[in-house]
Image (tube, rainbow, N blue to C red):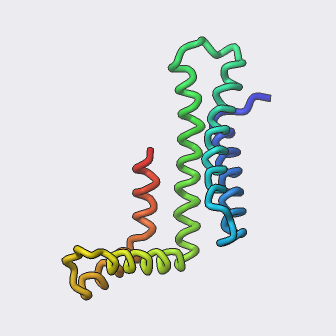
Amino acid sequence: MKISPAIKGIITAALMIGMILLIFNIGKDADARLQYAVYAIYALGIVWTLVTFRQTIAYTGSFGNLFNQGFRCFIVVTLIMALFYGIFNYSHPEFAEESAIAYKEQLLAEKNSSKTPDEIEEATHSYKRHTIWLLFMVLFSDI
């Protein structure tokens, strides 16, 4: 049975989402290094796509062939994960609240800060409103 790179991308994204939800359900007791397992699943999904394509008769030995297959898997995973992160963070507004508190503490801890307390409050409020967009920017800036 031949599985297309897009289907492999969907399978890879589903495994990544499963791992993320598992880490989330473990909570604060989870080791931070567990998040590397998500990246490992991502890499293994792309490697799986490339290795299985290499064993087909369509493989000509060119870099372009492999790149094409890997990119198809990569783009499907990236789009699904962006959608997942958006929905997940939208359904958990407490993340924005916690992040805004940490941001405010960081601003208050700066020794050479030229911001007044009102400016810090305004920056914190703006940060909280734009948390989801910040996450999307971080996600897509890594691409």
Residue 78 pos. (x, y %): 54, 47
Q: Residue at x 54, y 79 (%)?
A: 94
Q: Position of residue 126 (x, y in %)?
A: 33, 77
Q: Where the C terminus falls, by quadrant?
A: top left
> Left or right: 138 with respect to 23?
left
Q: Give the residue furthest to the right.
A: 1
- 108 and 41: which is toward the camera: 108
Measuring from the top left, give residue 89's x and y in whole percent: 54, 69
Task: State the residue in front, 117 or 73.
Answer: 117
Residue shown at 63%/56% (left/top)?
33
3 over 17 or under it: above or below:
above
Q: Residue at x 62, y 39 (%)?
A: 43
Q: Quadrant of residue 69?
A: top right
Q: Specify the quadrant that holds the N terminus.
A: top right
Relative side of 115 to 53, left or right: left
Q: Provide residue 31's location: percent of width, then percent of height.
A: 66, 62
Instruction: Choose top left, top right, bottom left or bottom right for residue 18.
Output: bottom right
Q: Residue furthest front?
A: 111
20 horizontally vs 141: left or right: right
Q: Is residue 5 above or below residue 35?
A: above
Count all numbered tags in the image, as a single digit: 0
Judge whether 4 appears above or below 141 on screen.
above
Outermost bottom residue: 118
**Residue sitting nearer the eye, 46 or 90:** 46
Q: Residue at x 39, y 79 (%)?
A: 105
- Nearer to the camera, 15 or 7: 15
